[in-house]
């Protein structure tokens, strides 16, 4: 083998090794980036959990739960009323919720929780939060909240003439179900 051939062979070997090193480094960097991105998602999710358990949201949630518990016997009477048909029960439930919210002056607490759930839904939709973490912490509470207060949410949409108001959290917590007709 001549010196020129050795030089050419070493140049090819060096190019192959360099290409391999660049590809390996790129893959390693991508794996590191994906791990870092996942850590950031989990961190953002845990920040929402911490925020939810702060005084403001915790007090709002406790107040809503206590008021709901106080009115629960009336709701049981309403649901056990055999005279009312299903459609009439839905209308009576809607009226019950709207009157309870008005009587107890809990509109602001409901709006605070709705705005929080909207941030949760946007965070997941934008893939800034880890969906599994968010689902584990908020899915059951969010669904229960929407099941309880959908008549008031619908009333606000009508009052403010905005059918998309809190639509993101509605579709996140109640996918495939339209709360307001």
Image (tube, rainbow, N blue to C red):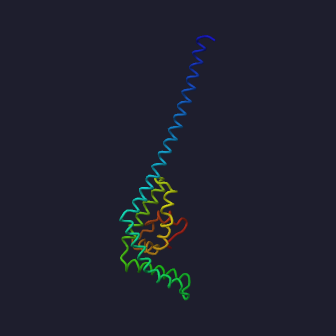
Q: Is residue 51 above or below residue 8?
A: below
Tell me if 105 is positioned left or right of 15 in this view: left
Q: Quadrant of the N terminus?
A: top right
Q: Position of residue 91 (x, y in %)?
A: 49, 81
The foreground one among 13 and 151 is: 13
Outermost residue toward the right in this view: 1
Q: Would you identify the image quadrant in which residue 117 lies?
A: bottom left
Q: Would you identify the image quadrant in which residue 86 lies?
A: bottom right
Q: Position of residue 128 (x, y in %)?
A: 46, 52
Outermost residue toward the top in this view: 2
Q: Is residue 127 above or below residue 177?
A: above
Residue at image position (56%, 87%) is: 82
Q: Is residue 65 above or below residue 3?
A: below
Residue at image position (48%, 42%) is: 33
The foreground one among 105 and 45 is: 45
Q: Is residue 94 above or below residue 54?
A: below
Q: Position of residue 50 (x, y in %)?
A: 41, 59
The foreground one among 125 and 53 is: 53
Outermost residue toward the bottom in this view: 83
Q: Position of residue 153 (x, y in %)?
A: 44, 72
The foreground one among 48 and 122 is: 48
Q: Would you identify the image quadrant in which residue 165 lies?
A: bottom left
Q: How many marks?
A: 0
């Amino acid at each position: 083998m001549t010196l020129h051939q050795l030089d050419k062979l070493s140049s090819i070997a060096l190019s192959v090794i360099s290409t391999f090193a660049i590809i390996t480094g790129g893959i390693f960097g991508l794996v590191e980036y994906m791990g870092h991105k996942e850590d950031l998602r989990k961190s953002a999710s845990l920040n929402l959990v911490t925020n939810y358990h702060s005084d403001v949201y915790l007090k709002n949630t406790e107040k809503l739960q206590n008021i709901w518990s106080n009115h629960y016997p009336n709701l049981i009477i309403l649901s056990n009323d055999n005279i009312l048909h299903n459609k009439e029960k839905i209308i009576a439930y809607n009226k019950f919720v709207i009157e309870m919210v008005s009587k107890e002056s809990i509109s602001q607490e409901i709006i605070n929780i709705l705005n929080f759930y909207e941030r949760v839904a946007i965070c997941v939709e934008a893939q800034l939060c880890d969906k599994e973490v968010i689902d584990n912490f908020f899915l059951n509470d969010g669904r229960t909240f929407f099941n309880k207060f959908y008549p008031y949410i619908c009333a606000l949409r009508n009052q403010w003439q905005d059918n998309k108001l809190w639509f993101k959290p509605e579709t996140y917590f109640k996918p495939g179900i339209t709360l307001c007709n």
